[in-house]
Image (cartoon, helix red, strand yellow):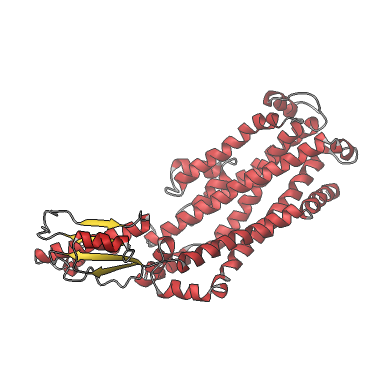
Amino acid sequence: MNKIFLVASREFKTRVQKKTFLLSTIGLPILIFGFYALMIYFQVKTTDDFKVAVSDQSKLFNGKIDDKKSTEVIFSFIDADTAALNKKLNNQEYDAYLFIPNGYNLQSGEPQIAFRSSKALGLMTREKIENRINNALEEKKLLALNISKGQLDSARLENNAISFSTNDGKKDNETKVGISYAVGMIAGFLIYIILFVYGTMVMRGVMEEKVSRIAEVIVSSVKPFELMLGKIFGIGAVGLIQFIIWIVLVFGLQFLIPVLFPDVAAQMQSAPIQPGAMGAATAVKESGALQGIMSGLAEINFTLIIGCFVFYFLGGYFMYAALFAAVGSAVNEDPQDAQSLLLPIMMPIIFAMVIMTKAVNDPNSTLAIFGSLFPLTSPIVMMARVAHGVPDGVTVVQLIASMALLVLGFLGTTWVAAKIYRTGILMYGKKVTWKEMWKWAFKNN
C-alpha cells in the first residue's frame, strides 16, 4: 500500500506542478468568466434604439401601436407617403418605416402593410417588431368583433389549470421537472467529459513511461499492479482537485458581476431591454415566475445529487481509468494502435449518453433502469435519474443496487486490467489486438 501511495504522490505532484495545470485549472474559468462578463456588458451597453416611422393612412392604430414602453423599438407616427418615407430612410432619420395604405381591410389583410428597413434586420429585432404589430392587429380585430383582449385572455386556460402529482400525493410541478431535467443533463454530461479526459490522461501517462522505458526501472521495485493503481489514484486526485477548483471559481466569479458592473446589473434588473436569455430572465422576474423557480429549486435534493455525483464520478473514473491504463500498456509508439483498441471502451460511454437523453425525460423507463444498473453506463445514466429525486426518479433499492454493481464492476475491471497491464507494460515491438489482450487477462500466472 505504501508503494501505491508513493506512485500516486509522484503522479499527483508531477502534474500539479506543471504550468499547464495552473493555466487549465485557474486560467480557463477566469477566461470563460471574462468572455461571459464582456458579453453581458456589451449586450446591455451597445443596445441602440431602432426607430420606425409609421404612416397610418387608414387611421388603423389611431396614433398608437401598443402601450409597451420599449427603448429598443420606437414607433413614431408621421403623415407621409412612400416617397417621403424612402427619403427619410435614405437620410438615416429612421431605421425603418411601416406604411398602412388607405382602405386597409382588417379582416382580409388587403392591401398588404409594407415594412421597409435601411439594412438587414437581426432575428431578435425582426421578431420583436413583428410580434408588436401582430398583437396590435389582433387587438383591433377583437374590438371589431366586440370582444376585448381582456375577455379573450380570461377565457384562455392557464398553465396551472391541471394539477400534476405522484401516487404518494406529492405535487409534481412543471418547474421542478424542468430543473430536474437540466440538473440531470449537466451532471451526466460532466461525468461523460471526465471519463474521457482523465481516462485518456491515464492512458497517455502509461504510454509515455512504456515508450521511454521508465516502466522497466519502476517495475524492478514496484509490482505492475501497484504501479497501475498508483497512476490511477494519482491522476484521479488531480482531476478531483481540478474539478473542485473549477466549481468554486465558477460559482464564486458569478458574484463579481454586480461588483464589476454595477450600472449593468441595475439595468438588467430595472429595464426589460435585453434580448435573448437576459430578456427572458427579466420577464420571468417581472411575471412572478421567479418564485416558482425558487420553489422548484427548493424541492430538488441537492445533497443527494452532490453525494451521488462524487460517488459516480470516482467509481466511473476508477473503472474506466483501469481499462484505459490496460490499453496504454499494450500499445507502442504508434498512436493509431491506441485508437483501434479504444473503440470497445468508448462505445459504452457513448451508449450511456444516448440512454441519458431518454432517462432525463422518462427516468422510470426500462432502458433508463437498465442503463443505471449496468456498471459501464450507470455513472452517466444514474445522474439523470437521481436528479428527479428518490423515489420519484429512482427507488432506494435501485440506487443501492447500482452503487454495489459499480463497485463490483470497478473491482472486476481492475483485476482484468491489472493482468493485461502486467504483461503489456514490458512487451515491445508487437502490434496487440483485443483477442491477445483477452488471453493475457485470463492466462495462468
Q: Choose between 390 and 30: the one closer to the eye.
A: 30
Residue at left offset 31%, top offset 65%: 94
- Name the spot of residue 12 as percent of width and height, x first: 78, 52
Residue at left offset 68%, top offset 41%: 200
Q: Is residue 436 above or below residue 415?
A: above
Residue 71 position by quadrant: bottom left
- Name the spot of residue 301 as percent of width and height, x first: 51, 62
Q: Is residue 189 visible?
A: yes
Q: Choose between 152 and 100: the one closer to the eye.
A: 100
Q: Is residue 179 above or below residue 288?
A: above
Q: Choose between 225 and 35: the one closer to the eye.
A: 35
Residue at left offset 55%, top offset 39%: 350
Residue 445 position by quadrant: top right
- Name the spot of residue 206 as percent of width and height, x first: 77, 39
Q: Is residue 428 left or right of residue 306?
A: right
Q: Is residue 172 visible?
A: no
- Name the spot of residue 29 as percent of width and height, x first: 62, 59
